[in-house]
Structures are given as C-alpha cells and as structure tokens.
Image: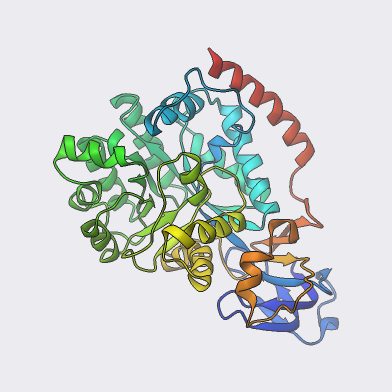
Amino acid sequence: MSILLTNATYIDWQSLAFTKTHILVEEGKNGTIKYIDDISLFPDCQVIDCTGKYVTRSFAVGHHHAYSAMAKGMPSPKKNPENFYEILQYVWWNLDKNLTRESVEYSALITAMACAKAGSTFVIDHHASPNFISGSLELMAKAFEKVGIGHLLCYEITDRDGKEKAQQGMDETAEYLHNYQALVGLHASFTVGNDTLKKAVSLANQFSTGIHIHVAEDLYDQTHCEKNYNKRVIQRLAEAGAMESSKSLLVHCLHLDENERHLIESSPVWTVQNAESNMNNNVGYFNGAGLGERIMLGTDGMHSDILQSAKSAFFVGQRYDNITYPSSYQRFRNTHHYLQTNHFAGDGDNNLVVLDYDSGTEFNQENFLGHFIFGIKSEHVHDVISQGKLIVKNRMIQTVNEAEILKESRKLATGLWDRMRK
C-alpha cells in the first residue's frame, strides 16, 4: 500500500529547497515519491498528516558494527588496556569470540531498531563472530529486514585466529555473495597476511564488489606494515589490487602520509570517518585534507545515531580537520551517493524521515546547515519510511515487538558477559 504524506514541508536532501506539498510514497526497493495536489485521487493510501513537520530523505550509516550492540554496560576487561592493540585484545576480540547464534541475531535486531528510531533506513555493517561464522551474515540480513532496514554486510576476514578461521570467513562471504549484495570484509592490514589479502581481492573481483577494511586506525597498523612488508598500508593495499573498485571502503584512515592521501584521492575508493570511536580509543583525529570528496560517516558500533556522528565530526574537526558546514552535511549524505554510484539497492527516494522539529528561530533553505549542526537531533525523528513502508510511527517501531526483543536481548547480553569473564 502506498503512503500519502499530507500537508508536509519537504526538504530536498540535495538542494535543501523547502516545498509545501502532499507526497505520495510508492512501496518497493526502487519506489519513488511524487508531489500531489489533489489527495482525494488517492483514497486507498495510508495517510500520515505532517502538518507542522518536515519531511526529508532518511539517513544511512556508512560503517557500523552491529556485533557490539550488547557492549553497553558490560564488565571491565580482565586487564586494563594500555594501548589500542590491547583494547582490541581484551575488549572487542573477547566480545566477538563469545558471540553465539542467538546473540548475533539479537545484536542485529536491536541495532536495526536503534538505527530506525534515529532516522537511518540503510546500514553498511562490518561483522565479526569467530565462533559463529557460517550463516552469520544471512541471519543478520534477515534480522535487519524484519525491522525494515536496508543493508550492505560483510564478514571480517582475518588471520588473527588462524588460517582455518580466515578460510571460514572467506567461505561465508562467498556463500552470502551468491544471494545478497555485500562487500568483502577484512579486519586490518596488521591481522591480514598476504595470502588472505590476495584471496580477498580475488573474491571481490569475482563478484564485482569491493573491499571493506579498517585502515591506519592506530599508528600500530602502519608500523606493523612497515616492519613486516617494508611499505605503508595504503601502498600495500594498492599493490594488492584492493583500491581499484569504487565499491571499496577504507575505514578510519587517521595515520596517513601525503603519498597515501594522494593514492586514495586518485583512486575510486571511499573513506569512512568515525570521529567518536577514534576519540574513545584515543587513536587520533581524522583529517580529510588531500582525500578528495568521497568521505562518508560511520558510527563504528559506538551507537546507531548518525546525526550525532555528524555533529561530533564537525566539532572535533574545528581543530583537527578542514571540515565546514557544507562539507559536514556532504559527508553525512555521501553514503547515499556511494550506494547510488555503485548501484546497491534499498536506498531509493522512498526512504523518508518525518521530523517533528519546532525551532524558536527561522528554519529555511538558507540557514538549514546551521540547524543541521546545532538543532536537529534524533529525538526529532517522528516517523520513518523505509522502501515505502512505515517502520516507525510516532517514535514507535511498527514492524517488530521492540519490548520483547529488548527483554530477550538483556538475557542474552548477561550470558555474553558471563562468558567474557571466564
């Protein structure tokens, strides 16, 4: 059933033009929207009165880790980490090794619900569960789809748990790519040997897709690469053929030299900034200088609120980056451009958010960016339409029983934390 948004003020997500109109929203992955003058011609539509509200394109998360959804409030690690490698070793690698089938599924469900309620209808996710690899991606995909969230998933292939686990990650990726749009995931250069890197690039080429990898998140990634391969990370990836596809995503990209920045800018790849995660891990600050305009924003599993990530990127960037009001919004919206450029499905014009935003100052095309940074928050998300279906109504999830899922998730999280303590 089509949806009719009546009495709306529509904000074009690219031109930022404001238009008072009624909007007909078609259902489906390739559905469109149309301005309507006479609503009486569409009596069978689901009607949402948007009087006093703003309608615009919904949001998208350029890099997420749904597997970390049960981390909030978890117990302290066995050892207090003293550097980034130990943060991985004692926190995140301990968590992902203890994930079960059920905790993977519910992590995806609660992530999808959180994204939806924060206005995002599409998520690019980078998954890891070393003791539950086979079938993990399809399980996550179905969980996202239950909620109504579009997705582009990958499994984090790595040699850190041995060649057998690396091959299992490769096999899971290949199996999933036969049935779903996806990327080929790699953890980071320092946990991926040459043989695995070569196989991953070959697999990506076989399915005409890209690589999704963490790059120079910490300086350790570069020092390890120089010590073991006599080159820096970007040069290693370029020589391996991992930077030839416009579908490839390089995540973080903090510790780069001028030559690496040039290699990225002159390639078709996209970079993904994750400001809050970088600050939380104390690994450094992103700077987009010399990287070109193909910069997206992610949450890196910290949360599911990409609006919050955009504000954080802007504020920290006042000292460490060349970010501006227009470029902060451009980065926020670039995930759409990435998906459209590469013909990934599920992020069409019929993905919309209705904002209940009542400001004490004028709000229009000319000052939109000031409201984007300092005014609009996820708490203003009132309704969300994904692929033409209403998935959030009056701030409530419509597609699944949120209360039951959260109740079960709390039980699973307690079990996960118990396993992590052992």
Residue 317 seen? yes
Q: Which of 157 and 84 is in front in this view?
A: 84
**Is residue 303 depicted above or below 76 in this figure?**
below
Q: Where is residue 27 in the image (x, y as percent from the top left)?
A: 67, 66
Q: Position of residue 159 (x, y in %)?
A: 30, 30
Residue under the point 26% across and 36% down: 196
Lateral position of residue 50 relative to residue 326, left or right: right
Q: Nearer the viewer, residue 361 or 61?
A: 361
**Is residue 302 depicted above or below 121 in this figure?**
above
> Image quarter for residue 130?
top left
> Image quarter for residue 106?
top right
Residue under the point 17% across and 35% down: 227
**Is residue 403 depicted above or below 413 in this figure?**
below
Q: Position of residue 406 (x, y in %)?
A: 73, 35
Residue under the point 43% across and 55% down: 272
Residue 351 seen? no
Lateral position of residue 224 relative to residue 148, left or right: left
Q: In which quarter of the image is the N terminus?
A: bottom right
